[in-house]
Amino acid sequence: MNKKTLFFISLVIVLALSAMLYLPQDNSTLKPRQDKPAQPSSLIRPEFSLPDLQGNLRNINEWDGQYIVLNFWATWCPPCRKEIPEFIALQEEYAEANLQFIGIAIDNEASVKQFALDMGINYPNLIAEMDGIELARQYGNIMGALPFSVIISPKGQILTHQFGLLERSTILKVTQLSKS
């Protein structure tokens, strides 16, 4: 085995072990594990401002009073691309019920603009580029994984966070929203 192959195998093993240590084993519960650095339900969301696709600076406070699904993603991330159509549908179905999706793109503006146009994304997408990794960490992404989503209460409390795909059922269970 050459050194590159051995290094790659070692890296995969370390990442797998890290994931097993930090990810909940039972996804039926929405409470984070006790070994995580902070309990989401006890945290108030960090404040930030980022430009949107039109270049306007947007602040997270604009969406106070709503349930927020804050989704850190990138156009080059296959699981990110997979969950976005469901987010588009949920935004349309539950906007009147106080649900707001916000995308935080760990990507360049041109790629995000084209992808948003092609997909018909109907919720704000903010451009964070590589600074988004630090912002995601502030929201609880200790692994640097994408996609990473956070569900925030209307009062600004972090209710839960999700490494990997965020499913419709989880969003509806956490927010307990119904269609108007």
Image (spheres, rainbow, N blue to C red):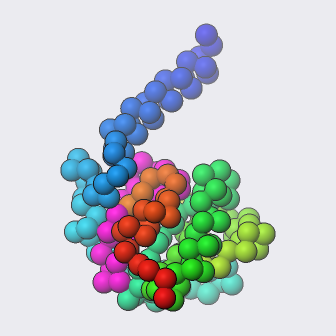
Magenta span includes 57: no
Magenta span includes 147: yes
Which residue is depicted at the point 78% across and 69% down?
118
Using the rendered image of the protein, determine whether residue 134 is visible from the camera's viewpoint: no
Using the rendered image of the protein, determine whether residue 179 is visible from the camera's viewpoint: yes
Q: Is residue 51 left or right of residue 68?
A: right
Q: Nearer the viewer, residue 85 or 147?
A: 85
Most extreme residue toward the top is: 1
| Tally of numbered discs | 0
Which residue is depicted at the point 49% across and 59% down?
166
Per the rendered image, the range of residues in magenta is 140-160
Horizontal and vertical percent position of residue 125: 60, 75
Horizontal and vertical percent position of residue 24: 33, 46
Which residue is depicted at the point 61% across and 10% down?
1
Q: Nearer the viewer, residue 177 or 165?
A: 177
Q: Is residue 60 above or below residue 130?
A: below
Horizontal and vertical percent position of residue 152: 37, 74
Quadrant assignment, res 42: bottom left
Quadrant assignment, res 56: bottom right
Q: Is residue 113 above or below residue 170?
A: below
Horizontal and vertical percent position of residue 18: 38, 37
Predominant SS of the magenta segment: loop
Q: Nearer the viewer, residue 29 or 44?
A: 29
Which residue is depicted at the point 38% across and 61% down?
161
Q: Is residue 40 left or right of residue 80?
A: left
Q: Is residue 124 above or below residue 140?
A: below
